[in-house]
Image (tube, rainbow, N blue to C red):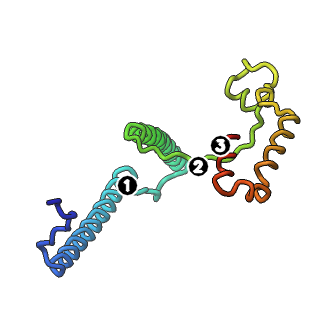
Amino acid sequence: MAPKAEAKPKSKISASRKLSLKILLLTRATEQLEAEKAAREEEKVRYLGEKLPPLQLTGLNMDEMQKLCKQIHAKIDKVDEERYDYEAKVIKNNRDINELNLKVQDLGGKFKKPALRKVRVSADEMLKALFGSKNKGSMDLRANLKSVKKEDIKQEKELNLEVGDWRKNVEAMSGMEGRKKMFDA
């Protein structure tokens, strides 16, 4: 006895229970997302408070102000250098990830072939592409074709006419005598 087609096993959880579990999971996930967002904001505020203490501009003379501006510019330059380094690392990592993905696709054998465009290429260009500069001159592709003589064409037409007109020979070939003539010929 052949086994029946695979039937889906019945779920042991009722539909209402599944729905309530999905709702619970979604609410828990949204709560976690909000908590992560708040933690990021707190980290950002803490980091900025650490790196950028509040400015005390009151009571500073011109020389102290210029010194403070130079310090701020130095910090800006340092931050820009770090940002550039991080961007370069991200670009390099993305390139590495793409290369590894291509290797995985090649190993998996599921490579998506790109859509090819139709290109008109003459026979000479095709031979040049295939054989490179080894190909000397143009190759006459018609040279190897079979030549047909006019006499052969005329003989074939005559044979077709003899066989083709069947109405003339119907009475002559009817009966046993006609079949005997066919075998004798």
The residue pinned by badge 1 equals 48
Viewport quadrant of the C terminus: top right
Q: Name the N-terminal-most of marks 1 and 2.
A: 1
Q: Name the N-terminal-most of marks 1 and 3.
A: 1
Image quarter for residue 23? bottom left
Q: Nearer the viewer, mark 2 or mark 3?
A: 3
Distance, label 2 to label 3, CA atoms, is: 61 Å
Question: What mark, if any, has residue 115 been given in the picture?
Answer: 2
Q: Name the N-terminal-most of marks 2 and 3.
A: 2
Q: Nearer the viewer, mark 1 or mark 3?
A: 3
As drawn, is 109 to the left or to the right of 159?
A: left
Distance, label 1 to label 2, CA atoms, is: 51 Å
Please, what secondary structure does the residue beneath circle 2 have? loop
- At label 2, the amino acid type is Ala
Q: Residue furthest bottom?
A: 16
Q: Residues within 10 Å of mark 2 (few under 14, many from 20)?
A: few
- At label 1, the amino acid type is Leu
Q: Nearer the viewer, mark 1 or mark 2?
A: 2
- At label 3, the amino acid type is Phe
Report the front residue among 107 and 70. 107
